[in-house]
Amino acid sequence: MEAKVINNISECLISIDRDLKEREKVLEKAGDSLKLSLAWLEYFLKYYDDRDIKILVEGANSAAIESFTLFAFGFLRPSALSLRLYYELFHQFLYYKDHNLEWTAARDFRAQAKLPKEVRNTFVNFHATFDKRMNRLLKKRRRINENPYNVLSPIAHGSAYATLTAVSQPVDIVCQTSKLEDCVFIFSEVDEYLSDICASSFDANILSLPIAVRDDLDERLEGKAASVLEM
């Protein structure tokens, strides 16, 4: 590796270290923005810890940590790719936890993994209350985008042209903390959407929901979550 490139990489690391305390604040804010969906993962791990499908839960949790850590470092595109993985693994778990034969086939590379749209369509078509609940939650959403996957996928495929950058040296890929504040909202978007998917496909009563999720639903539905969602 040429000395010039090595020096440029050093500048990249120096740029990150220069405002490390601010980046730690960004890391905490991004992590907190996923509190609902992470609460769901903790809930699922408690009940599926003895099954090999827990690898999807652990993988999703790892992808979340990877995403907000990369984000705090200022690596926006890799962070978006990890957040997209978080979204996809989350959906895969929701499907395969109830479809063991298909999970075994996907795990052993004998079948393609389920895509998020396929998972949602399964819930719409076969879960008695899913569509009704999702529509009611949609009317009370805080997020800007109905489905944040429509933001993450174009970034991953390079078709979100406004996100393309002109980089001439390694230090150019490090986003400054002042700009990160404008982008942190995407974590909340993904978080609320995933939590709503889980709540809409939940088969137990409302008291069994993770506490953070129950509080969020009660706040959005003005204390009437149990009746509105028919739980």
Image (cartoon, grey):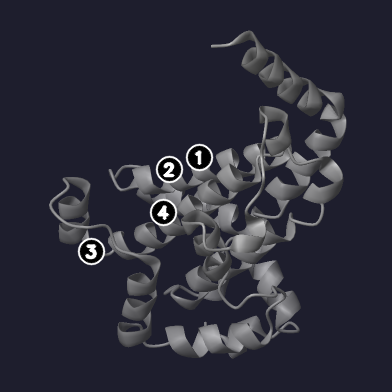
Q: Amino acid at mark 1?
A: Ser
Front residue (pair 134, 184): 184
Q: Position of residue 116 (x, y in %)?
A: 39, 67
What residue lies at 49% left-to-right and 62% top-to-bottom?
153
- For the residues marked 2 and 4, what is the alpha-carbon distance in whole angstroms? 7 Å
- For the residues marked 4 and 3, what is the alpha-carbon distance in whole angstroms? 15 Å
Q: Amino acid at mark 4?
A: Leu
| Residue that badge 1 annotates | 62
- For marks 1 and 3, the one nearer the N-term is 1
- For the residues marked 1 and 3, what is the alpha-carbon distance in whole angstroms? 23 Å
Quarter of the image where one finds residue 35: bottom right
Q: Which mark is residue 89?
A: 4
Image quadrant in which the N terminus is located: top right
Quarter of the image where one finds residue 100: bottom left
The reply to whether callout 4 and callout 3 are in contact (CB within 8 Å) is: no
| Residue that badge 2 annotates | 59
Q: Is residue 216 left or right of residue 99?
A: right
Is residue 211 visible in the rendered image? The answer is no
